[in-house]
Image (spheres, helix red, strand yellow):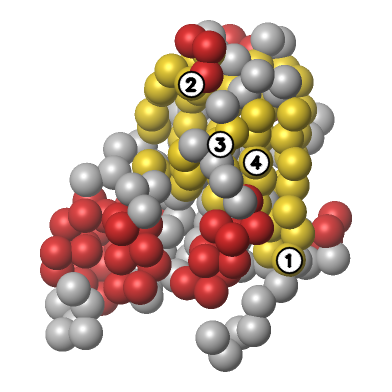
Amino acid sequence: MRIGIVSDLHGNTAGLLRAIELMGDVDEVLCAGDMVTEYKFSNPVLEALRAREIRGVLGNHDIGLLGPNGARVRENPAVDPDLVGYLGTHPYSIEVQVGGGKRLFMTHASPHAPHNQYVFKGSSELKRFAEIDADFIVIGHTHAQMVERVGKALVVNPGSAGQATDPSNGRQLSCAVLDTSSDEVVIHDYTVDPAV
């Protein structure tokens, strides 16, 4: 099974659509959160996610927009309330069976409290991921790519498909494709025209 992975879209429709194109023929696409930016909603991003049935989890920006601080954004007449409702249907984490009965766990940042922790290669928080009973763990939040084996789990952070801040790939956008049979992860780095 081939799974496309995006994260941290931050309302960048062109970044999401280019990622979908680069990932090619995949069985499913997952989004590890931050579909929007806390103070700016994106009808086109949510429309694209819903139309393609991309399964996702809430990120800190999504939670902020849905909370009390996001009221002014949600009340903007240009914001589609149906799409705000759709955003609100996403859980904080998901655990699913993928190719061959393997378990995939996805959340935006750390699965351990406090849940907004940034998890980087070599961090003590990453080592705690060995406690999670999963074959694959998908996270986002840092905008930094990571493919690391922690205990039995392969931890994948695809970087950001919407807001390029990772110096390790020249501050390009990125997405990932996970092959659940071989545990191979291919990261795609790319740029998009910001005017699109």
Q: Position of residue 148 (x, y in %)?
A: 76, 28
Q: Could you tell whether 146 is left or right of 140 in the image? A: right
Q: Are marks 1 and 4 in contact (CB under 8 Å)?
A: no
Circle 2: element type: strand
Q: How far apart are the two marked residues, 1 and 4, measured between alpha carbons?
A: 14 Å
Instruction: Tell me the quadrant of the picture where the C terminus can be found.
Output: bottom right
Q: To which residue does mark 3 refer?
A: 3
Q: Are marks 4 and 3 in contact (CB under 8 Å)?
A: yes
Q: To which residue does mark 1 refer?
A: 190
Which residue does the image show at 22% across and 45% down from the upper left?
89
Q: Are marks 2 and 3 in contact (CB under 8 Å)?
A: yes
Which residue does the image show at 75% across and 41% down from the upper left?
186
How many numbered markers are drawn?
4
How many residues crowd mark 4 within 10 Å: few (<14), some (14–19), many (20+)?
Answer: many
Amino acid type of the residue that numbered disc 3 sits on in the rendered structure: Ile
Amino acid type of the residue that numbered disc 1 sits on in the rendered structure: Tyr
Of badges 1 and 3, the one in the foreground is 3
Q: Nearer the viewer, residue 49 or 27?
A: 27
